[in-house]
Image: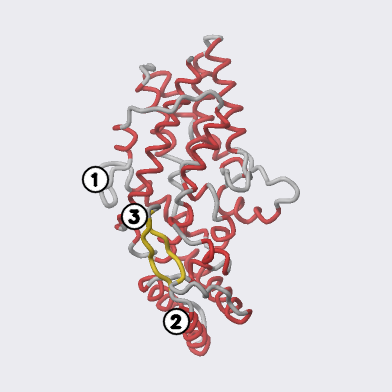
């Protein structure tokens, strides 16, 4: 958990609160950017002064660990300090978006995660493999649909939607109430239920697959917030989803076999309103969005072996699995 004082201090709080590894990464990456030696020196020295002036610490409480300022009076940055953090973060983001994010594909919001989760959920309720395959084949389709933009008044979301979440309906921030994932999940779930009652099984399971996409999306903490941070550092989202995808099966990536979380779960949340269930899953995942962003941002070269990132991923996937089982039951009841 990240202390709100840190997040409120600057939009570039993840750089401000960098731990030793994060600081070393930032300073080393600045040397690789297209900057003059004088600029590298100026930014590096400026960051060192800021980190020295505003040290952070991990505090243990009944609610778990919280990253906070080491001194209670800290946290009010000068205009010059904020300007330097802004410049450094923007320069690093440009470099890392090209180096890390440029070649990655979005694997949480695409094959294999979406497809496997709904297919496994169907089979656990005794659905035939034919019908489960209909849902499987439809689960990725929403990623190819035309982009939906935020409504007037939410222009600040545009970069996040365009660069990170593909569309306004692939996201939901429960604190702000922004995003159409709950509405889209409900729309297609209720259509699937209607088709099921009419014994139109191809349509029923196809629309179930569509619905599952929007529900599964918000099981990813990075689809529930950190909009400004991710719009700048889109590589964080890309690299995290690549990490999930490359560790999906046994024997790949670091061997975490995240698919096994879905395979091994037999519990479900009863669903009476798909929109409410989507908001509930987003609320659970959002508990991790700031911590996950912070860990990937600062541990960009080692987060794939970070036990906290692995734990967050498994917890989020487990809650997603329970909601998906609820969705299948909702359509068939």
Residue placed under numbered mark 2 in the picture: 52
Of the residues under marks 3 and 1, which one precedes in the sequence? Answer: 1
Q: Nearer the viewer, mark 2 or mark 1?
A: 2
Above or below, 163 relative to 119: below
Asked whether, in this view, residue 238 is left or right of residue 166, the answer is left
Q: Is residue 180 above or below residue 62?
A: above
Pointer 3 residue:
308
* Labels 3 and 2 touching (C-beta < 8 A): no
Q: Taking the image as drawn, is residue 103 in sight?
A: no
Image point 46% across, 60% down: which residue?
2
Q: Earlier in the sequence, mark 3 or mark 2?
A: 2
Instruction: Say which element carries label 2.
Output: helix
Q: Is residue 32 above or below residue 6?
A: below
Identified at 37% across, 38% down, the residue is 318
Residue 143, quarter of the rendered image: top right
Disc 1 element: loop
Disc 3 and disc 2: Cα gap in Å?
Answer: 26 Å
Task: Give the labeled residue for mark 1.
Answer: 251
Looking at the rendered structure, the number of numbered marks drawn on it comes to 3
Viewer-proximal residue among 251 and 49 = 49
- Residue sitting nearer the eye, 177 or 324: 177
């Amino acid at each position: 958990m990240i202390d709100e004082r840190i997040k409120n201090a600057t939009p570039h709080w993840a750089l401000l609160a960098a731990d030793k590894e994060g600081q070393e990464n930032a300073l080393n990456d600045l040397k690789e950017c297209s900057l003059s030696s004088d600029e590298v020196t100026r930014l590096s020295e400026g960051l060192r002064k800021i980190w020295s002036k505003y040290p952070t610490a991990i505090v243990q409480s009944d609610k778990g660990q919280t990253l906070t300022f080491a001194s209670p009076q800290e946290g009010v940055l000068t205009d010059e300090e904020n300007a330097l953090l802004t410049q450094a973060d923007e320069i690093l983001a440009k470099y890392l978006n090209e180096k890390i994010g440029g070649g990655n594909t979005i694997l949480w919001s695409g094959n294999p995660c979406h497809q496997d989760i709904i297919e496994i959920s169907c089979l656990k309720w005794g659905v035939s493999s034919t019908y489960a395959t209909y849902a499987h084949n439809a689960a990725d389709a929403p990623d190819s649909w035309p982009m939906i933009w935020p409504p007037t008044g939410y222009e600040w979301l545009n970069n996040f939607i365009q660069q990170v979440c593909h569309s306004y309906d692939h996201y939901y921030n429960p604190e702000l109430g922004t995003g159409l994932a709950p509405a889209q999940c409900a729309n297609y779930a209720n259509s699937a239920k209607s088709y099921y009652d009419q014994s139109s099984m191809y349509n029923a399971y196809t629309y179930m697959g569509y619905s599952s996409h929007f529900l599964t999306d918000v099981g990813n903490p990075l689809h529930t917030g950190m909009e400004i941070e991710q719009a700048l550092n889109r590589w964080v989202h890309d690299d995290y989803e690549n990490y999930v995808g490359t560790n999906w099966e046994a024997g790949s990536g670091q061997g975490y076999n995240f698919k096994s979380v879905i395979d091994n779960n037999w519990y479900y949340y009863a669903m009476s309103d798909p929109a409410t269930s989507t908001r509930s899953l987003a609320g659970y995942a959002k508990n991790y969005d700031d911590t996950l962003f912070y860990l990937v941002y600062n541990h960009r070269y080692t987060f794939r072996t970070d036990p906290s990132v692995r734990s967050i991923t498994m917890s989020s996937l487990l809650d997603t699995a329970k909601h998906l089982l609820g969705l299948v039951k909702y359509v068939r009841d």
